[in-house]
Image (cartoon, helix red, strand yellow):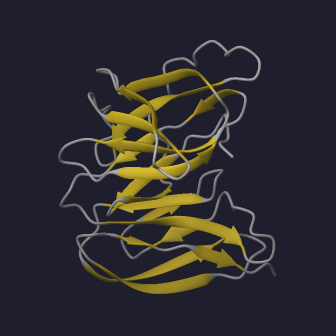
Amino acid sequence: MVDKKNVAIGLGIGVAVVGTIIAVTRKVKAAPPEPPPGLANIYGVVTDAISGKPLANVSVTLWDHTKVELLLSALTDNKGYYSMLNISPISCIVEFEKEGYRTISESYALTEGNNEINIALVQIGWAGIGGIVTDATTGRKLMGVLVQTAYEMVMTGSNGRYTLVGLELGEHLMRFSKEGYQTAERTIMLTEQGITVNVALVAL
């Protein structure tokens, strides 16, 4: 389910989304008016994951949950803003694509009303790590998990996502820590394609 107040930042690794979630991206200028009852809006801002600058002319496409039928499409404006209005609240795939950047394609369960989806795209040639941190018992996505490497640290967002970008290629030791949970460590080998590292933390 899309958190209507969530800033969902994703890192495209290959063709899939890992997200995440890193520093808060640029906030949307304003939410569109609420749609009629029983309908949904999608809107947000697309930025460059390194510079934080808004990206114009990003292709945003809405697909059915199997990615067989294209339902709607839009382009971001010069402030990186896009919107798709008065659509059915369905399970779907939203894809973000721009030349020179890694494509993000992620599943969402839209809810009635406004659904804000902000995305940060990573330029091809940069390596990144992204993923989701959950509770090992309940599967609940954990906010406020500190994710560290030797060079970077970020906190997971309200949907449990994190992203580390612009990292050197090679081996990295990652540490995931949150009060009330056992700290987890993962050793990964980072290549130009990037890597997804999802972690389930065990409560103390």
Residue 81, quarter of picture = top left
Q: Is residue 167 left or right of residue 68?
A: left
Q: How many marks?
A: 0
The residue under the point 67% across, 34% down is: 4
Residue 60: image location, x then y, percent: 38, 35
Q: Identify which residue, 53 or 39, lies in the foreground.
A: 39
Q: Is residue 4 left or right of residue 126?
A: right
The residue under the point 50% across, 24% down is: 84
Quadrant including the C terminus: bottom right
The residue under the point 56% across, 40% down is: 7
Residue 118: image location, x then y, percent: 48, 38
Residue 117 versus residue 190 in the image, above or below = above
Q: Identify which residue, 65 or 198, lies in the foreground.
A: 65
Residue 174: image location, x then y, percent: 47, 79
Residue 149: image location, x then y, percent: 42, 74
The residue under the point 32% across, 69% down is: 194
Residue 55, quarter of picture = top left
Q: Name the outermost residue toward the front.
A: 68
Residue 8, quarter of picture = top right
